[in-house]
Image: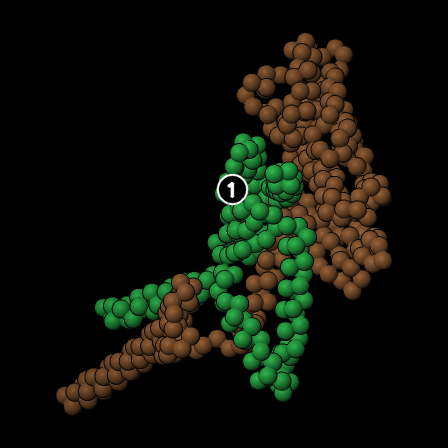
């Protein structure tokens, strides 16, 4: 009857209202998306213009400075200067990578000697020099066991470049020896008995080892002497085997001595784990 | 069904965002080219910068600070080049990867050491940890004329193999000095 008809109309009205709300929401969302697209398009176009201008400049095309590309502003003087500062700073950082860098000071110059082992950069050391009336070392961060005084006496007054070069050789060799000992300790601790013994200059190393991890005994004993302080490989490698060890091991000491003199310490141990070696 | 209506816009938004990211990176990378602005442009900027903004006293660096900073850096750079004999003629770097504390940049460098020209490129991996930054060189490529000395090409390929950029420059420096000395000696006796 009438009531049910009214109910039906009410339900329909309710449904219509819901649908309307839904449509409104959809339209709102569409509007938002459209606006976002416009915003991004504008941003993208501006960037494109900026990059085009930049690329033209890089290719050295004439007339770029005065051409009016809409939306791409000519960089301000401040921006150009800031760019130049960054560019020079980047160049100075490259000097750090070459091993000798520095900066001028009120009283002379402060050099920075960087060290590296193969591609890995290690510690760097500073040397603050006074240049007048004669060249003198004002301050430095060179470790005490590096023969700085000797080198200074020999070269500092007559040839600063040679002095720095010699110092760099000593420091790089020391850094290289230390790096190898650290690498051995870090990566092959399971093959070493305890920690390896070393002096501050890292030119003498003593350790007991085996050739593969998880073993209980360390039949080999090595003493490495680095007679040349400007080199990071030992001049002498004395390898011995504990008495009573199987002959197959005892026979290897000569080969090991040879490997230690030819290869960096961690690389020597890497070679020990290759298939031919794991016979013990 | 209604979703397809949004999809078109959402797709375009995603494409635009990616394009913007790529363009921004390209812009940044190209800015790193060391020959981006010519020396005349820079000189002009320095002059007009100082004149125009003499009265500006806002938060950023005052013009004389910026100019002084640039002069001090350039003096250091030219001192180093004169002292070491290593002259860089161009340098560019490009960020290859940047995630958290890891940054990998590809560098291209060319220059002369005394009279010997060289060109090289390498990747520099830097990892920032609490107190310091560690740096490792990979993919080192060196182009250098070996001239009459086979020793040069041997040493170039061995430093390349181990990424030993530092050793390359140290050795190049000694070799170039020796080479220069030898050349001068020969000329003297001609």
Decide if residue A89 is in sight here.
yes
Depicted A69 relative to depicted B112: above or below: below
Q: In what element is the residue under mark 1?
A: loop
Query: Which of the two residues, A257 or B8, is positioned nearer the viewer here?
Result: A257
State which quadrant residue B128 falls in. Answer: bottom right
Query: Residue A61 location in percent, x, y?
Result: 38, 67
Residue B56: name its quadrant. Answer: bottom right
Tell me the residue at 71%/33% (across/down).
A231
In the rendered image of this protein, which colour is used for chain A? brown
| Image quarter hosting the C terminus of chain B | top right
Please tell me whether residue A122 is drawn above or below residue A246 in the rendered image. below
- Residue B138, percent from left and from top: 54, 44
In the depicted structure, whether residue A72 falls above or below residue A107: below
Badge 1: residue crowd in 10 Å (few <14, some 14–19, many ≥20): some
Question: Which color was chain B given?
Answer: green
User: In this rendering, does residue B14 appear at all?
Assistant: no
Horizontal and vertical percent for residue B57?
Answer: 64, 85
- Residue furthest to the top in view is A247
Describe residue B142's horizontal placement relative to residue A98 as left or right. Answer: left
On the rendered structure, is A167 left or right of A212?
Answer: right
Look at mark 1 in the image and give the residue it sits on: B144
- A46 or A109, nearer to the observer: A109
Camera-nearest residue between B21 and A126: A126
Q: Residue at x 22, y 86 (%)?
A: A13
Which quadrant, please, contains the N terminus of chain B?
Answer: bottom left
| Residue B9 position within the rendered picture, expressed as x and y whole percent measured from the top left | 29, 71
Residue at the image point whose x is 28% and y is 80% from the top = A27
Q: Tell me where residue B179 sits by quadrant.
A: top right
User: Would you place residue B99 above or below residue A261 in this image?
Assistant: below
Q: Tell me what residue is drawn at x 56 percent, y 35 percent.
A: B152
């Amino acid at each position: 009857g009438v009531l049910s008809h009214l109910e039906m109309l009410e339900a329909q009205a309710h449904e219509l209202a819901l649908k309307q709300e839904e449509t409104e929401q959809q339209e709102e969302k569409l509007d938002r998306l459209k606006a976002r697209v416009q915003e991004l398009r504008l941003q993208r176009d501006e960037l494109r213009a900026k990059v085009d201008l930049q690329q033209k400049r890089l290719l050295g095309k004439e007339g770029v400075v005065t051409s009016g590309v809409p939306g791409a502003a000519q960089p301000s003087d401040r921006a150009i200067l800031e760019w130049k500062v960054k560019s020079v700073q980047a160049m100075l950082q490259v000097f750090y990578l070459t091993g000798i860098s520095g900066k001028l000071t009120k009283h002379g110059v402060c050099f920075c000697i960087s060290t590296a082992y193969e591609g890995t950069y290690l510690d760097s050391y500073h040397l603050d020099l006074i240049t007048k009336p004669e060249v003198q070392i004002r301050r430095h961060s060179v470790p005490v066991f590096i023969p700085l005084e000797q080198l200074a006496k020999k070269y500092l007054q007559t040839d600063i470049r040679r002095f720095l070069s010699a110092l760099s050789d000593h420091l790089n060799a020391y850094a290289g020896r230390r790096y190898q000992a650290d690498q051995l300790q870090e990566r092959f601790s399971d093959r070493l008995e305890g920690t390896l013994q070393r002096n501050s200059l890292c030119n003498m190393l003593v350790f007991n080892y085996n050739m593969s991890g998880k073993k209980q005994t360390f039949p080999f004993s090595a003493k490495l002497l680095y007679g040349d302080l400007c080199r990071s490989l030992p001049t002498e490698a004395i390898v011995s085997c504990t008495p009573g060890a199987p002959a197959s091991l005892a026979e290897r000491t000569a080969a090991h001595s040879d490997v230690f003199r030819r290869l960096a310490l961690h690389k020597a141990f890497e070679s020990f784990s290759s298939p031919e070696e794991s016979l013990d | 069904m209604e979703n397809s209506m949004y999809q078109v816009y959402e797709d375009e938004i995603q494409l635009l965002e990616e394009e913007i990211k790529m363009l921004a990176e390209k812009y940044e990378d190209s800015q790193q080219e060391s020959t981006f602005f010519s020396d005349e442009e820079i000189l002009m900027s320095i002059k007009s910068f100082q004149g125009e903004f003499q009265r500006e006293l806002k938060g950023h660096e005052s013009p004389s600070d910026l100019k002084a900073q640039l002069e001090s850096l350039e003096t250091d750079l030219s001192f180093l080049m004169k002292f070491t004999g290593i002259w860089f003629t161009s340098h560019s770097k490009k960020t290859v990867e940047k995630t958290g504390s890891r940054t990998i940049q590809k560098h291209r460098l060319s220059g002369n050491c005394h009279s010997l020209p060289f060109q090289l490129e390498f990747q520099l991996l830097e990892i920032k940890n609490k107190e310091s930054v560690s740096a490792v060189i990979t993919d080192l490529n060196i182009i250098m004329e070996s001239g009459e000395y086979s020793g040069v090409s041997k040493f170039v390929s061995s430093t390349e193999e181990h990424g030993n950029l530092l050793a390359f420059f140290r050795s190049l420096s000694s070799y170039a000095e020796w080479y220069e000395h030898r050349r001068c000696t020969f000329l003297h006796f001609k």
